[in-house]
Image (tube, grey):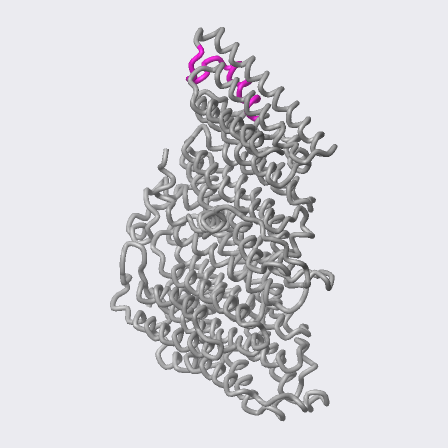
Amino acid sequence: MNPLIFTTILMTVLLGTMIVMMSSHWLMIWIGFEMNLLAIIPILMKKYNPRTMEASTKYFLTQATASMLLMMAIIINLMHSGQWTITKVFNPTASIIMTSALAMKLGLTPFHFWVPEVTQGISLTSGLILLTWQKLAPMSILYQISPSINLNILLTMAVLSILVGGWGGLNQTQLRKIMAYSSIAHMGWMTAVLVYNPTLTMLNMLIYIMMTLTMFMLFIHSSSTTMLSLSHTWNKTPLTTTLILITLLSMGGLPPLSGFMPKWMIIQELTKNSSIILPTLMAIMALLNLYFYMRLTYSTSLTMFPSTNNMKMKWQFETKRITLLPPLIVMSSLLLPLTPMLSILD
Amino acid sequence: MLKIIIPTIMLMPLTWLSKKNMIWINTTTYSLLISLISLSLLNQPSNNSLNFSLMFFSDPLSAPLLVLTTWLLPLMLMASQHHLSKEPLIRKKLYITMLTMLQTFLIMTFTATELISFYILFEATLVPTLIIITRWGNQTERLNAGLYFLFYTLMGSLPLLVALISIQNLTGSLNFLLIQYWNQALPDSWSNIFLWLACMMAFMVKMPLYGLHLWLPKAHVEAPIAGSMVLAAILLKLGGYGMLRITTMLNPQTSFMAYPFLMLSLWGMIMTSSICLRQTDLKSLIAYSSVSHMALVIVAVLIQTPWSYMGATALMIAHGLTSSMLFCLANSNYERTHSRTMILARGLQTLLPLMAAWWLLASLTNLALPPSINLIGELFVVMSSFSWSNITIILMGANITITALYSLYMLITTQRGKYTHHVNSIKPSFTRENALMALHMTPLLLLSLNPKIILGFTY
């Protein structure tokens, strides 16, 4: 794509999200979402083939439906409260419709079906933008309306998302689908604590974005989209295998890595609010996620996976430039001692 | 406590910056020096703990375990030299780094005051152990072994996290020193029963309790020698240590909640000892023997009498040294014949007489011969369980007999009789191996002169 056009489109995506996050008028928020959606379609279709077209169409249809549902919720809110400013949504009907719309945008169960298929159909970099940047806008709206969200619906969606994210990823070998199911599960964790302490949602979002960025950067570096091609990295850059190991264990939520911090804080917040069975259930279901991350580490870093003889003499093409990988790695693995500071940031 | 932790952390830059011919010398020497520092902690002036800071403390229970941990690192390094000799330098350094990281987490776990900090470090010990087992183990089954190890432990310990946080809500603080004085009886309710279960299951899986012990033979057999040593000697004791700490907060539910686990342990120790009599795999025999000894510790901890606590602590230290020594002996066989089958390497006394002396001493301490500290531990546990209920003497007596049976079976099969014709060309024992066995045996024998230091806080 022409670099100038690409930059313009990327800036529109950024602008759309910024408009969503910074507006106080509901209509502007809807406009921001639409701007974001329309501008990201060309980015999803960077490579022009039928699979990307299908993925972009699926994404467009689900997100447009969600935007329309959002518009309906805004109008109902306008009817009942008579104003367009963003505050808590007083009318329960509007609140439920808005929560469903935002859940559709985020990919929470039962609206999660588009996430694996769309992520699989697009290139790695577009998948990165889809799974990290696109989550920011809906999450910021959820943060702002958090006092009025119906707790039952949100917790049901959260727990089901963790279940689906865990079980769905178990039979996958395609890395992008694995990252998609991981995203569904993490979104579940984030929304579970939204009503109790929205700061922790933001903390989880921050740590999740760092870890997903790191994983995608490592995948882009080795140009691998399947578990099989990832298992060849020990031939090319053995250090990458160690980095993949650390980041995957962090995503699985193992202490002492920083991926444990959001889970610990969320469990603490939920327990303080006297729900005990729920965090236990969520924590145990996160082990399903850990299982397929472990399978990935087994084929990549902890064994020297069998490869053909000529893998060892592979031509070294020019190495892809990975932006900011060392700080990302450090932040996605070593942040646990900073927990007191990070859990009170607003 | 930082005087032990910071040097241990600094062992990592030491490994990475050492030259190729100095790497083993440097790490072994400095880890021996660190273990000398930790010996000063054994001087516990009163029953109250030595409080070093808000975050670290040491009391008569954790000090012997800490000394055991620091003593084992140089031994693990010495034991790993042979099987790592053919690996490239970076992989050797990675292995030593994993061992050092594990050591740091273990030291911090045994001295943590805040129970959540204990939990995080308890979980953190899983990661280096997992990497050691799956990366440097020798057979394909190691992958499965790593998964079983990780998931059994995590399933047990996630409810512990929730339980610890809810206890913090109830009592306001999880600092162990404070809780000792604030302790109130837990009211009797269903949710407190689940709280008891949530707190104890993590340590039951780690000990391991008989019904949840499936990960242990897999992990011990598939791990390389340093992995087996640290698993048997220290990681199992983490479970015992955790149980000893957390049962102070869990009265009075323990009086009736402990029954199922007591039954499982009493039956399980006989079952696992009997399985040892039919094992063909040497490492598997030692692994099941570990389950059997740890079942005694579980019985002792759940009975909650002063003598049983003394027995539990002594048994933990004694079993740590004995089991680690048995794994080193099994490894010396493995390095020569590359097989763990017992009958493939018989009659070694004719070929390696000094090693046979170490085999004899290890087997004798395993079957708890007087006056070793193994006997002191077992005897205290047997006596206190007899006072708890008279019938247990039958099971305990049967266990002691079967332990003697399989220890002697192991000794006689590997050492006595005519040697097999294909082992008459094995390499003689290295000085390193003899030093390793001596360093295991000497503390064990010397402790029988003054067992007071390992009898824990109820002495």
Report if residue A89 lies within the magenta region. Answer: yes
Give the residue at x 31% y 53%.
B180
Report x, y in % for residue B22.
Answer: 45, 78
As rendered, which of B68 and B124 lies closer to the eye? B124
Report x, y in % for residue B193.
Answer: 47, 44
Can you say which quadrant of the picture contains the C terminus of chain B?
A: bottom left
In the image, taking residue B323 as reference, residue B60 lies left or right, namely: left
The residue range painted magenta reads: A84-103
Give the residue at x 68% y 76%.
B341
**Residue farthest to the left, as pictured:** B45
Residue B165 to residue B341: above or below: above
Is most of the magenta stretch helix, strand or loop? helix
Give the residue at x 45% y 72%.
B73
Report x, y in % for residue A155.
Answer: 53, 29
As rendered, which of B216 and B142 lies closer to the eye? B142
* Total count of labels: 0
Residue B392 to residue A81: above or below: below
In the image, taking residue B62 as reference, residue B342 lies left or right, namely: right
- Residue B134 visible? The answer is yes
Can you say which quadrant of the picture contains the N terminus of chain B?
A: bottom left
Report if residue A107 lies within the magenta region. Answer: no
- Residue B313 visible? The answer is no
Report x, y in % for residue B222.
Answer: 62, 67
